Amino acid sequence: MILAIETSCDDTCAAVVNGRRALSNVVHTQAEHARYGGVVPEVASRSHLERIDGVVALALAEAGASLDDVDRIAVTVRPGLVGALLVGVAAAKGLAYARKLPLVPVDHLEGHVAAAYLTDPNLEPPFVALIASGGHTALYSVDGEKKMNLLGETLDDAAGEALDKGARMLGLGFPGGPAISKTSRDGDSARYDFPVGLRDKKNLDFSFSGLKTSLLYKLKALDEEQTSEEMPHLAASYEAAVVEALSRKLLQAADLQQSSTLVVAGGVAANRLLRETLESECKERGLRLIIPPPVLCTDNAAMIGAAALNTSSVPFPDYLNLNARSV
Ligand code: KG4
Ligand code: ZN
């Protein structure tokens, strides 16, 4: 049994994982960042510090387990906000040391991909994976449980970042992805033409910066009343451009790699339009598509526990000088 901890950004998370099964998955989302319109690193660290003990206790309780049942402690060590990561790393070291347990240092991006193993326990590499989150947007060919080969990545903003920035420009609040998705429900996605970065390029890279600029100019041309009337259409058209970029490049990667299994991970994979678009495209092409349920797409510790299954552990007490890294 693995007790996993994740604190790389603004969610304080702990989970208990047994094989490819999550017995609990507790996520405390820090609401205090909303009023700043984005994550404030120092606020995140302090909030993790206040919450981590309670979140770990709850994860054990919900799994019906105690520390006596735990064989290993897993923790995200990179990439992320260093101050935030350090809280999780310190908590994990403390627990592991007190119990003389091994500690497993986990990469957050490997964690996002590993959410797919909890979703479909029969999944085995090779497959193509798209990670789309607030900090990363990249395509990988996954050849072994630990082998992720980069096929392409964003040249500027991450997909989630583009949604967050777009939502801020539209006055929709933070985090922007869910806000845009909610507002776009009654909108016409064909009303506005937003650029799909690198759309016709053969490579597998992404670019989302032109999208923001395009939204800026569209908003400049509208007065306050028009902006409010057009809001659902602006949100729907903007969201559709992000979704088109992601789904196009993922399907292109599947073609190039001749891969019949696709995994989509990261917070943006919680997006309804992206899920629906890929489900229908993959069905048409006869491809197997694995997108974890939304709670396993956004940051959580169960995915870190799942990644720990394929990561070597550091024996007691060699991990005391283990450090967190931002990249
Ligand atoms: O993976 P994640 O929770 O944290 C990072 O590792 O970055 O991803 C957070 C990102 C944010 O940009 C957020 O706006 C986006 O995922 N997101 C969504 C949805 N839920 C979260 N984007 C679109 N639709 C959603 N439903
Ligand atoms: Zn993440």
Image: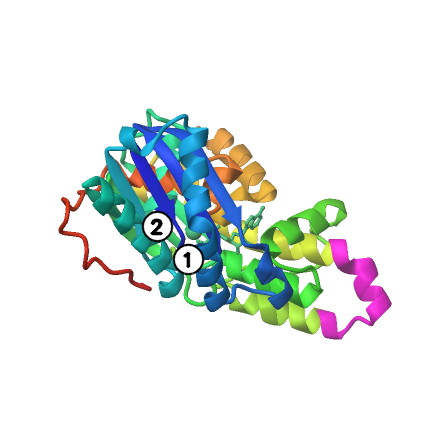
- Asked which colour scheme the image uses, the reply is rainbow
Mark 1 and mark 2: span between their CA atoms? Answer: 9 Å
Where residue 69 appears, x then y in whole percent?
29, 28
Query: Is residue 226 rendered magenta in the image?
Result: yes
Q: Quadrant of residue 23?
A: top left
Q: Which secondary structure, mark 1?
A: loop
Q: Nearer the viewer, residue 55 or 23?
A: 55
Earlier along the polypeptide chain: callout 1 or callout 2? 2
User: Which residue is label 2 attached to?
Assistant: 109
Where residue 194 appears, x then y in whole percent?
63, 61
Horizontal relation, residue 317 to residue 294: left or right: left
For ligand 1, tell me if the residue under mark 1 lies within 8 Å. Answer: yes
Q: Is 248 placed above or below 19 here?
A: below
User: Which residue is label 1 attached to?
Assistant: 136
Q: Main secondary structure of the magenta part?
A: helix
Q: Nearer the viewer, residue 35 or 210?
A: 35
Q: Is 8 placed above or below 293 here?
A: below
Residue type at numbered disc 1: His
Q: Is 30 placed above or below 42 here?
A: above
**Can you name the residue that lies furthest to the right here?**
225
Q: Which secondary structure, mark 2?
A: helix
- Locate the N terminus and report the quarter of the image it occupies: top left
